[in-house]
Amino acid sequence: MLPEGVMLHYTIQPLGPECVTAGETQGGNIMGLGKVSQVWWVFTVEWPQEGSDEASQKAVDSCIDALTASAKSQDLLLNYLCASFANLNQDVIHSYGVENLKKMREISRKYDPEQLFQELQNNGFLLRDA
């Protein structure tokens, strides 16, 4: 049950294999997306009072857990997480795959040898935390 004034809504975002192919022709697939039809679920929750933080987060977590269990039971789960839609407690960078993580670290060291971006950025999905 959500506290009064809390709004939970979702968006279903389809992604076809053609999108992955198009990305590869433009330079790669650093996020490790599979060439399969996909449906991304984006949950958003809004609440007016600070005291609703925990209940609101639990509601989103409950939705994610239910969808994950359903996808797993049907052997449809894709372990990709989109940074634009992920929660800070989700492991986005590792969802891109071991080889892509290695490649991102190599690129980071090449173009930012002092690792200023990794060290001075205070939050988000960062390579230093992966």
Image (tube, rainbow, N blue to C red):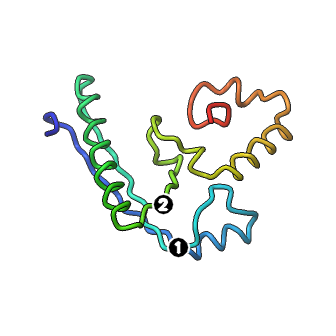
Provide the residue designation for mark 2: 78
The image position of residue 78, as x and y in percent, is 48, 60
For the point 25% across and 46% down, the residue is 8
Residue 109 vertical position relative to residue 80 in the rendered view, above or below: above
The image position of residue 93, as x and y in percent, is 60, 44
**Residue 14's disc number:** none
Residue 60 vertical position relative to residue 79 in the rendered view, above or below: above
Is label 1 in a helix, a strand or a loop?
A: loop
The image position of residue 123, as x and y in percent, is 57, 28
Is label 2 in a helix, a strand or a loop?
A: loop
Q: CA distance from mark 2 to mark 1?
A: 10 Å
On screen, residue 120 versus residue 57, left or right, reads right
Q: Amino acid at mark 1?
A: Val
The image position of residue 32, as x and y in percent, is 63, 59
View extreme (bottom): residue? 18
Provide the residue designation for mark 1: 36
Q: Quadrant of the C terminus?
A: top right
Q: Choose top left, top right, bottom left or bottom right for residue 127.
A: top right
Residue 50 vertical position relative to residue 25 in the rendered view, above or below: above
Q: Is disc 2 in contact with disc 1, using a CB cutoff of under 8 Å?
A: yes
